[in-house]
Image (cartoon, rainbow, N blue to C red):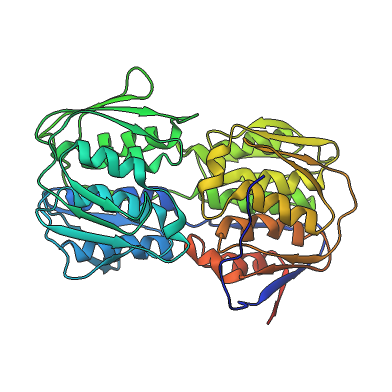
Amino acid sequence: MGQVTVHSSEDPGTIELVPVGPIHGTIVAPTSKSLTNRLLVIAALASGTSLLSSPLVSDDTDAMISGLRALGVAIEPTPRGLEITGSAGRLRPPATVVAAGLSGTTIRFLSAVAALVHGEVVLDGDPALRKRPIGPLADALRDLGAEVATADGHPPLRIVGHGVRGGHVVVDASASSQFATGLLLIAPYAEQDVHLDVSGLADQGYVQLTVGVMSRWGARVSSDPPGHYVVGAGVHYEAADEEVEHDASAAAHLYALAVATGGDVTVANAGESAQPDAGIVAVLEAMGATVRRGPGGTTVGRNAALTGVDVDLAAMPDQVPTVAVLGALATGRTRIRNVAIARGHETDRLASVAAELRRVGGEVDELPYGLVVHGGLPLHGGRIETYHDHRMAMAFAALAAVVPGVEIADPSCVAKTYPGFWVDLERFGLVALERS
């Protein structure tokens, strides 16, 4: 179906986990990348000085901080967190290109923010980021009054802002909900109320996450009916202090290790969350996991057989690799539906997951909208390519923890969202052998 391409011409080495049987332990997961980057933008646009406690420190959040600083926002680390002096929506043109690295949230959110700048902003990223679409967001920004040039609907972008007009705007978010989030984040600073219609999304969970954060920081947002959002013009963000909660997507990779090995992992800082990926625990339960929630966090384990599931992952497409890998270790068939959007992530995750599971003996049917994984087959060692995709590396760690000889290429790609991932696995007793 899709085409899989390894982007790097250099061999970044591999890491091999030595299976040790069921793993057990308690750990603190990283804080949320999705929330950290949303909060950074909101605090940067707010009036006054804000404090973000426990922000995620990763390549993606570093890219966002650097980009906002380039637009004139003062962001300073303190012992309590990040202190952000808001711009009240008045930003300056950057002196150089705003470099987003591999961060989709950074280039998409800051492309929208650039429409507020009276002057030219050029945004670019690493070669892999230039393959990710941004055309629908550019179209919507033009409708709001910005001049936008792209490379055939992809980065780099050149944006000249003239203020944001507001009014009715439509965005096709079938390739990424981040298009809608970027538009919503700047909408309080429009000249008129913004009426945003979001099409093409199978699930509005991440957009609703944005709405919740905006409302907490003083914006006036309504979302009725689903997919239609109205943001009040002139009702700006006010400075606030907020502690960033755990990253549900990162926690999912830790839970998967417990489920794969038949052990149990407690994520001490994982409580109730509006993050869509928090729904992964229900999927794991359906596959045979046990889940306990309490004041000490969330514990996921398994003491029975792992079985396949038929699951719609539209709300959490980042979990496609996780569920597919566990499906290969389960008995029966695992069908993952409604995730065509995953083809436009860091890599075409449907094609990439299918290719890598086949490499170690798995049987996978790749469909336009999802995957069917035939579990229960004998799996063997092999080199797993990760395509510069942090989720591929972390998801296949669950396989490497139970199948001897599985080597994961480019292990450092996890720094995008979870720099300490391999160190945390060693805390569970897993030995990580680095190979060049």
Q: Is residue 52 left or right of residue 276?
A: left
Q: Toward the viewer: 376 or 99?
A: 99
Residue 92 lies, in percent from the top left, at 11, 60
Q: Residue at x 21, y 65 (%)?
A: 69
Q: Quadrant of the N terminus?
A: top right
Which residue is painted at 81% across and 58% down in the image? 360
Total numbered labels placed on residues in the image: 0
- Using residue 430 as the reference point, say whether residue 142 is left or right of it: left
Rendered view: 40 above or below 65 = above
In the rendered image, residue 291, in percent from the top left (x then y), is placed at 67, 38
- Give the residue displayed 59% in from the left and 32% down from the top: 338
The vertical placement of 417 against 182, above or below, is: below
Q: Is residue 409 above or below residue 304?
A: below
Q: Nearer the viewer, residue 150 or 140?
A: 150
Where is residue 181, by image quadrant? top left
Residue lying at the far front of the rendered structure: 152
Q: Is residue 80 visible?
A: no
Instruction: Specify the quadrant that holds the C terminus.
Output: bottom right
Residue 55 visible at all: yes
In the rendered view, tell whether residue 89 sits above or below residue 129. above
Residue placed furthest toward the top? 225
393 to the left or right of 209: right
The spot of residue 178 in percent (x, y) is 38, 43
Instruction: Point out residue 16 in the picture as x, y percentages from the top left corner.
Output: 73, 71
What residue sits 67% from the left and 31% below the top?
311
Q: Tell me where residue 31 sits by quadrant.
A: bottom left
Classify residue 187 by image quadrant: top left
Nearest the viewer among 194 and 24 is: 194
